[in-house]
Amino acid sequence: MRSHTAEPSLAPTGSSAPEPPPRKAGFARERAAPAGPRAALQRLADHVNTRALVLLRATVGIVFLGFGLLKLFPSASPAEQLAVDAATKMTLGLVPETVLLLSLAALETAIGIGLIAGGRLLRPTLVAFFLHMGGVFSTLLLLPDAMWQPHSPAPTMEGQYVVKNVVLVAVCLVVAADAWGSGSRSSRRPDRTDRTTSD
């Protein structure tokens, strides 16, 4: 009578080692979450990060709205005469100063409202903003006596007032990149869906 001995079975070479039991996700999150002031700073940073573009355009909009409203009141804006002198040179003196001042006030107020409101007003507002900034920086050439110190390449107080607008231009470039970039991405999406449905 033959005796049958059971040989130990070997695991196949391709099989992986047994996986450890999964850990609870909540436990990992609790350990990873910072505590105390660090947690508050992290929440604040996340909040600002998700609303950075809205914060940027709303801030510039408030600045423009304030400057535009100031120009509606005589002698309330410190840059009133400077803006009128530059606009007078641009229009060759054909437009009265009162009309120029009211036009500048209306333009800056409209830009401020458009930046704050956003939505469909954002793109035409950005176009108006960049055109307006072109006129603002042109004062560095149109009014050299008021913009630059004599016998020195350093700007005057009025010149510094104009040069600082480069910060507003940089902010609106970021806002415009997002606004026009999102529009181009959304215009490409229907093409992809049409291709998938046609296939």
Image (spheres, rainbow, N blue to C red):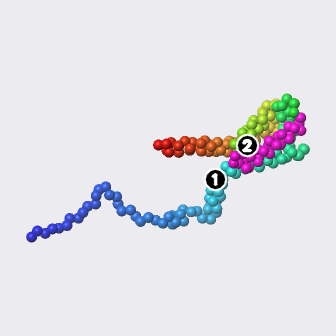
> In the drawing, what numbered circle is on residue 136?
none
Q: Residue furthest top?
A: 92
Q: Earlier in the sequence, mark 1 or mark 2?
A: 1
Which residue corresponds to the image point at 66% horizontal and 53% vertical from the top-left? 51
Magenta-drawn stretch, dominant element (helix, strand or loop): helix
Which one is nearer the viewer's eye here, 132 or 182? 182
Q: Which residues are magenta?
A: 96-121
Q: Nearer the viewer, residue 94 or 45?
A: 94
Give the residue at mark 2: 125
Q: Please, which residue is most extreme toward the bottom here? A: 1
Report x, y in % for residue 34.
58, 62
Identity, as a three-letter code, of the amino acid under mark 2: Thr
Q: Name the side, left or right, on which 157 lies relative to 43.
A: right
On the image, numbered disc 1 is attached to which residue?
49
Residue 154 shows in the view: no
The image position of residue 70, as x and y in percent, is 85, 46
Write the residue at 69% across / 46% down.
Answer: 120
Q: Residues within 10 Å of mark 2 (few under 14, many from 20)?
A: many
Q: Does the residue at mark 1 contact the one at mark 2 (Cβ under 8 Å)?
A: no
Q: Which quadrant would the N terminus be assigned to in this image?
A: bottom left
- Provide residue 40's location: percent of width, then percent of height: 64, 62
Q: Quadrant of residue 173?
A: top right
Three-letter residue code for mark 1 = Asn
